[in-house]
Image: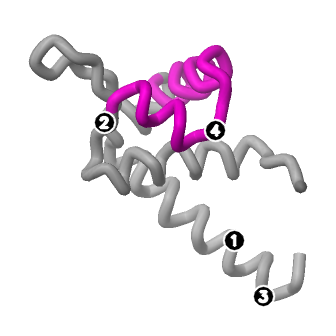
Amino acid sequence: MKRRDKLEIVNDILLAIQNKGGKIKPTHLLYKSNLSHKKMMEYLSELMEKNMVAEENEKGKKMFIINQEGFNFIKEYKKIKEFSDSFGL
């Protein structure tokens, strides 16, 4: 099994949030991203710094919300993936 690189992991995290309607509970994201809690939080910190993801409290529960920059990343990553796949890379 091939290890995921950083861009794949970021894409997986953002897609997991997008697929849950744009917001997700930390526990659900942990399962969907297939990362340890520590690693997931490291990635989320970086994504929050880059304004791709925001953290909000909804009825006393922590939620992660995807921002427009996150949607832009998903779109551009898909283009890059399709381009590299077309060359068999």
Q: Check the picture and name the quadrant holding the N terminus.
A: bottom right
Magenta region's main secondary structure? helix
Number of residues whose C-alpha sits closer than 10 Å to that of mark 4, classed few (under 14), some (14–19) or many (20 or more): few
Of the numbered discs 2 and 3, the one sitting upstream in the chain is 2
Which residue occupies the foreground of this view, 32 or 51?
Answer: 32
- Tell me: residue 42, above or below residue 24: above
* Amino acid under disc 4: Asn
Q: Dots 4 and 2: beta carbons under 8 Å?
A: no
Q: Which residue is mark 3?
A: 86
Q: Which residue is mark 4?
A: 34
Range of the magenta residues?
25-48
Q: CA distance from mark 4 to mark 2?
A: 18 Å
Q: CA distance from mark 3 to mark 1?
A: 9 Å
Place residue 53 in its image quadrant: top left
Residue 81: mark in rendering: 1
Where disc 1 sits, the SS reads helix
* Amino acid under disc 3: Ser
Q: Dots 3 and 4: beta carbons under 8 Å?
A: no
Residue name at image x 66 percent, y 23 percent: 36
> Does residue 32 belong to the magenta stretch?
yes
Q: Among all residues in the image, which is located at the extreme left?
A: 59
Instruction: Decide if residue 1 is on the left or right side of residue 59.
Output: right
Q: Which residue is mark 2?
A: 65
The mark tally for this picture is: 4
Of the numbered discs 3 and 4, the one sitting upstream in the chain is 4
Percent of width and height locating residue 62: 28, 18
Q: CA distance from mark 2 to mark 3?
A: 32 Å
Q: Among all residues in the image, which is located at the extreme bottom?
A: 86
Percent of width and height locating residue 57: 20, 17
Which residue occupies the foreground of this view, 34 or 89?
Answer: 34
Number of residues whose C-alpha sits closer than 10 Å to that of mark 2, classed few (under 14), some (14–19) or many (20 or more): many
Of the numbered discs 2 and 1, the one sitting upstream in the chain is 2
